[in-house]
Image (tube, rainbow, N blue to C red):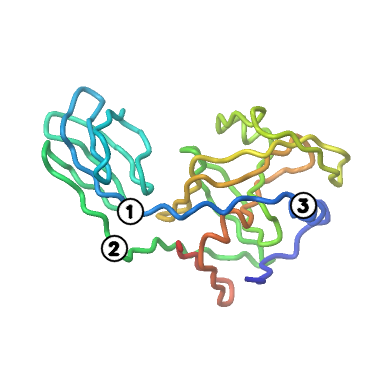
Amino acid sequence: MNTTLTQQPRSWRILRRLLSLFPFLCLPFAHAAEISVIGVFPGKAVLVIDGAQPKTYSVGANLAGGAKLISVDNNGAVIESNGRRETLGVGQHMQPLRNVRAKVVLQADVNGHVVTQVNINGGGTRMILDTGATLVALPASEARRLNIKYQNGQTAFLNTANGRSQGYVVKLDSVRIGDLQLDGVDAVVVENGLNVGLLGMSFLNRTDMHREGREVTLIKN
């Protein structure tokens, strides 16, 4: 995929070239999981996922295959998977949807930039879709606001348009646009020289991307 979506300022182009120096690991794509409820408690549920041993999960926990435990009450557990929510009573289970591919349609602005709201680790931020950036990139200020412990990541030094800047290579738990969510996404957090997040290829190359005019469609692989 060699589509170029934007004509970007010099600082972005420089950072893109620097980001391309960082190799990243393409993780296996998460598969939809079969989830069974075998017990409920206040704020928690005991689940069996894909036949594994029972495990207790708290409300808000991310489960296998991009599923999430939404809530728990005496009636059972509400689980969200692939954009659908089901209430499962004790002894009930959720079958994975087969051949369902999440899709999102974005619009480029008059300058060709695709700017969109992105949910990272449960928090929202605005990002520019950038096929020239190898990794998802975040300014340190946004990473702190999103409670990303980036200073635990691998240290790197970047020469940006605004001078030399320290960066940290991290792995994001989840990156979501609309109904399209990917887990375990490689990223770099930049201390200085980046004013807006870049949605780079560590996210985009795990989708099928198509452009027609100003309309950009991303479909989960």
Mark 2 element type? loop
> Are the residues flagged by discs 1 and 3 in contact, CB closer than 8 Å?
no
- Which residue in the protein does label 2 denote? 98
Q: Residue at x 17, y 28 (%)?
A: 40
The percent coordinates of residue 185 (x first, y second) are 55, 47
- Which residue in the protein does label 3 denote? 21
Q: Amino acid at mark 2?
A: Arg
The percent coordinates of residue 196 (x first, y second) are 68, 46
Mark positioned earlier in the residue sequence (1 or 3): 3
Q: Is residue 185 left or right of residue 190?
A: left
The percent coordinates of residue 154 (x first, y second) are 69, 34
Mark 1 element type? loop
Mark positioned earlier in the residue sequence (3 or 2): 3
> Are the residues flagged by discs 2 and 1 in contact, CB closer than 8 Å?
yes
Query: What is the crowding at mark 2: few (fewer than 14 residues within 10 Å), some, or many (at least 20)?
Result: few
Q: Is residue 198 left or right of residue 47?
A: right
Q: Residue furthest bottom?
A: 212
The percent coordinates of residue 126 (x first, y second) are 58, 47
CA–CA distance between discs 2 and 1? 8 Å
Mark positioned earlier in the residue sequence (2 or 1): 1
Instruction: Tell me: residue 91, above or below residue 20.
Output: above
